[in-house]
Image: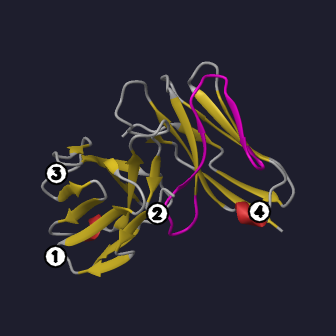
Amino acid sequence: GQQLNQSPQSMFIQEGEDVSMNCTSSSIFNTWLWYKQEPGEGPVLLIALYKAGELTSNGRLTAQFGITRKDSFLNISASIPSDVGIYFCAGRRSGNTGKLIFGQGTTLQVKP
Amino acid sequence: GAVVSQHPSRVICKSGTSVKIECRSLDFQATTMFWYRQFPKQSLMLMATSNEGSKATYEQGVEKDKFLINHASLTLSTLTVTSAHPEDSSFYICSAQQIDIVSNEQFFGPGTRLTVL
C-alpha cells in the first residue's frame, strides 16, 4: 500500500537536543497525525492537525500542517531519554472513511 | 478514556492452525475498527476496515478468506487468521474510531504478536 515519505529514518541524539522530523506526500491530505510507538506496543496519538498551516503543541512537542497540505513536521524540544521510540506520521485524505496512511517511521534514540 | 485492548498479547501456534485475536474498545463505542499488520522494523500496513454489523473492507492484496474479520458489536471486533503459516508471523494491531464526537481519531490497541512455527 501507499506510504508517506518520512525522514529521517533514524536519529541518535544527545539528551537535551532538539529533534525535527517530517513527512511529505505527492497528494493532499486533510488530516495529519503524529504517533509514537514503543517496542511491543501499539501507537499512541501525540498530535492531530486538521487545518493547513495549523501549528499545535503538546508539551515539548510541536507539529505543523503544511500550507500545501502535502507535508507536516514534528519537533521535539529538549529531548529526554523517555522520548526514545518510533515516531510515525499518518495522513487521512479528504472524503475517505477514516483510513490512515502511515509514514515509514523515524526511530529516535537519546543518549543520556 | 479511549482505551483499546487486544487479546491475546502474544500467541505461538503450529502451522495450519487458526488463531483468533480480539479487539475491544473499553470505554467508548466504535462503529469502525481497523486491523493493521506490522513486520519488524516496518510501518503499519492496513489490512481491513471493519464496520459494526457489516462486512469488512479489505485492502488490496489481503486475502479475506484467510483473515476473517467479525465486528459483532460496537465494542468488539475479531480477526481470525485461518490456516496460519510462518509467513503470517507478525505484529497485529487494531484501532477503534470513536463515534458521536467532533474528533474521530483512531485509538490503537497494544498489539498481538503472532508466531507461527
Mark 1 touches mark 4? (CB < 8 Å): no
Q: Residue under mark 2: which chain is it in?
A: B
Question: In the image, what residue type sits under mark 3?
Answer: Lys
Q: Residues within 10 Å of mark 2 (few under 14, many from 20)?
A: few
The reply to whether label 3 and label 4 mark residues of one chain is no
Picture disc at residue B40 = 2
In the image, taking residue A84 as reference, residue A14 lies left or right, namely right
Measured Cα–Cα span from mark 3 to mark 4: 41 Å
Kindly identify which residue carries mark 1.
B17
Measured Cα–Cα span from mark 3 to mark 2: 23 Å
Question: In the image, what residue type sits under mark 4?
Answer: Val
The reply to whether label 1 and label 3 mark residues of one chain is yes
Kindly identify which residue carries mark 4.
A110
Seen at 50% across and 38% down, the residue is B103
The first of marks 2 and 1 along the sequence is 1
The first of marks 1 and 3 along the sequence is 1
Measured Cα–Cα span from mark 2 to mark 1: 23 Å
Q: Quadrant of the C terminus of chain A?
A: bottom right
Q: Residue under mark 4: which chain is it in?
A: A
The reply to whether label 2 and label 1 mark residues of one chain is yes
Counting from the top left corner in percent of width and height, residue A105 is at 56, 49
Question: In the image, what residue type sits under mark 2?
Answer: Pro
Seen at 17% across and 58% down, the residue is B68
Kindly identify which residue carries mark 3.
B64
State the extent of the magenta-drawn residues as a range.
A37-61
Residue nearest the viewer, comparing B73 with A38 = B73
Q: Compared with residue A2, is residue B8 higher up or lower down, i.e. above or below?
A: below
Mark 3 touches mark 2? (CB < 8 Å): no
